[in-house]
Each structure stands twice: as C-alpha cells, then as structure tokens.
Image (cartoon, rainbow, N blue to C red):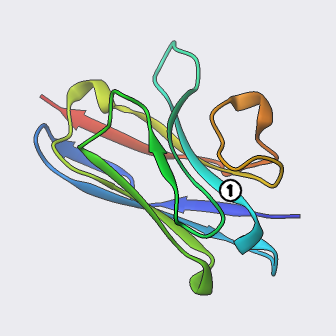
Amino acid sequence: QVQLVESGGGLVQAGGSLRLSCAGSGRTFSSYAMGWFRQAAGKEREFVASINWSGSSIIYADSVKDRFTMSRDNAANTVYLQMNSLKSEDTAVYYCAADRTFLHIRAVATVDYWGKGTLVTVSS
C-alpha cells in the first residue's frame, strides 16, 4: 500500500514557475514508477510526466516537454515536478500516481495508487 500526498500548487502568472512535490509512504516507494497527471475542468485526466523507479528514465507529454522537469528522491520518498514557463492551458488539478508493474506510467488505467491532487491555476 502506498499513500501519496501532493503539495506546491497555487496561483501563478503566465510565464511563472511552480514546483510540485509528492510525498509517498511505505518502504517500497523506490520500487514504483511514478507519474504526474493533470485534469482541467471539464476534461479527461491526462498524462504529464513519468519517471522510472531509479530516476534514470523520464518521459514527458509533448505539451510540457522542455518546460517541465520531473525528478525523484527515493531516500526522501518524494517526487517533484518543476514547472517553468507556465501557460494558462496548464491550469488543472495535478495528481501524483504510482505503478509497480510498468517501467513508466502513461495511462490512467495502469495506475495503482493516486494522490488527491493539488490545484495549479495560471492567470493570463
């Protein structure tokens, strides 16, 4: 069982930056692939980024590539999402996700555990 708690969301102007954190519980945290998803109002939840268990492999959605950076600290049971050059279309609730089966998390259906989310609002 893994419990995930996101933090770091808030209101930011377009072009600004935010850093999201996701703290995980449990001794097996380092064995999970971790991901970030987001869900804007009225839209489906979508993939943002994923990192493998060791942090050696990271993938991004095209919409955030070169602006967002995902990382993890297994000693601290925490993953991060550094978001730069934020746009109004990045406004959404951001969710942390964990999966033990695959190298990366790309699909909502493969997620084993979800956090409750943190709201990011980008004003234009």
- x, y (%) of residue 69? 34, 54
For the N terminus, the image quarter is bottom right
Quadrant of res 53: bottom right
Hey, which residue is sitting farthest bottom in the picture?
75
Quadrant of res 92: top left
Left or right, 105 with respect to 73, comes to: right
Q: Residue at x 70, y 30 (%)?
A: 108
Q: Nearer the viewer, residue 117 or 112?
A: 112
Question: How many numbered discs?
Answer: 1
Q: Residue at x 32, y 35 (%)?
A: 64
Q: Residue at x 61, y 79 (%)?
A: 74
Left or right, 4 with respect to 82, comes to: right
- x, y (%) of residue 11? 26, 46
Hey, which residue is sitting farthest top in the picture?
42
Q: Amino acid at mark 1?
A: Ala
Please rate how many residues cluster around mark 1, counting C-alpha atoms within 10 Å: few if below 14, some from 14 to 19, many from 20. Answer: many
Hey, which residue is sitting farthest front in the picture?
56
Q: Is residue 53 above or below residue 17?
A: below
Q: Residue at x 36, y 28 (%)?
A: 62
For the C terminus, the image quarter is top left
Left or right, 108 with respect to 64, comes to: right
Q: Secondary structure at mark 1?
A: strand
Q: Is residue 70 above or below residue 41?
A: below
Quadrant of res 67: top left
Would you name the residue on which mark 1 appears? Answer: 33
- x, y (%) of residue 94? 49, 42
Q: Is residue 93 above or below residue 118?
A: above
Q: Is residue 57 above or below residue 24?
A: above
